[in-house]
Image (cartoon, grey):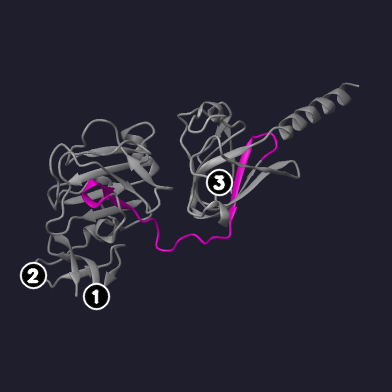
Amino acid sequence: MKKFYAFAAAAAIAMSANAQALYMTGASTADADNGGLPAEWAPSNPAEFEIVNGNFELTVNGLTSFKISTTKSDVEGDWTGFNEGILTCNYGEEQGVTVDLEPGTGDSPNILCPWEGDWKVVVAGDFSTITMTTDTPKPAGGIQLYFRGDMNGWGSDDAWLFENVGENTFRFVCAEGQQINAGEGFKIADANWAKYNFGAGEDPILADMDNALFNNGGNITLDEAWTGTCYLTIDPEVCAEYAAGAVAVMYLATDAEDVPEWFEGSGVANVAIDENAPAQYYTLQGVRVANPEKGLYIVVKGEKSYKAVVK
């Protein structure tokens, strides 16, 4: 008899979970007519999951980041109702992984897709886990990050693209005349403000020291105009050393010889070059080019490096 009651209780819990609805709102590069979300970040007009074999399933084209909830809001633009049922997680970098969900709040970070794509999102019927899969290939060439801010209209153009010099390490070298002025707001993000969107707190960032950055943090500002070399890492171990919750560490160097310890040994930064040797050319991703054709390159000569356009 005890076993029967235990089974009945478990079945009742499962039926209760599956009797509920599950909703998603967020950002997708496809519109609703092409398989995207009904609207971006609309807690009163979310997409609703279907119940398939006891689980919640939803496929969204061009999905980049999102929130899910067992409730939705009644008033347009009001997150109160949606936030009452939020579930959250840190999904990670690869698809097909099953990750535990936990109750969230309005302050919980967005769930970030490993990359922009047509994602099938499956949530267990008891809301305990989430699994994301896609047929959209993982982008080649590694992570691409840009300075995006007042100095470039918040765009993602190649002139402000970081060199990807390692799995978790990036470098940006200001071209001649290129700088960020004191008080100009900016962030470091990918082209779609999706998986990577690094900001800071309220205080201006200082040059020549490590600064912790956070997902969806506020605009970064500087205490004085800066031109030089920026080093960035998203290595979890390095980030944990500087601040709880930090997802990136940025070092703005004003001296070409000033390289942070965590950057040493990565990419083209430490290639020993004779001062009198001819210039060497690298792509913006840190790949050396013997015979550069027309385009934008990193030029390394002696202890100096700078961006230059080959015409």
Q: Give the residue pinned by disc 1.
A: 294
Amino acid, disc 1: Lys
Q: Position of residue 106 (x, y in %)?
A: 48, 28
Q: Is residue 255 above or below residue 244?
A: below
* Picture quadrant where residue 273 is located: bottom left
Q: Evaluate if marks 1 and 2 touch, with contact meaning CB atoms under 8 Å apart.
A: no
For label 1, the SS is loop
Q: Give the residue pinned by disc 2.
A: 276
Local crowd size for mark 2, using a 10 Å CA cut-off: few (<14), some (14–19), many (≥20)? few
Residue at x 32%, y 39% (from the top left corner)? 199
Relative horizontal placement of residue 274, taking residue 239 as reference (left or right): left
Relative horizontal placement of residue 86, taking residue 299 as reference (left or right): right
Q: Is residue 240 magenta?
A: no
Q: Position of residue 138 (x, y in %)?
A: 49, 59
The tally of labels here is 3
Q: Is residue 150 magenta?
A: yes
Q: Is residue 1 above or below residue 247?
A: above
For label 3, the SS is loop
Q: Give the residue pinned by disc 3.
A: 38
Amino acid, disc 2: Asn
Q: Position of residue 72 (x, y in %)?
A: 58, 32
Q: Which residues are magenta?
A: 124-153
State the separation of the CA atoms marked 1 and 2. 25 Å
Amino acid, disc 3: Pro
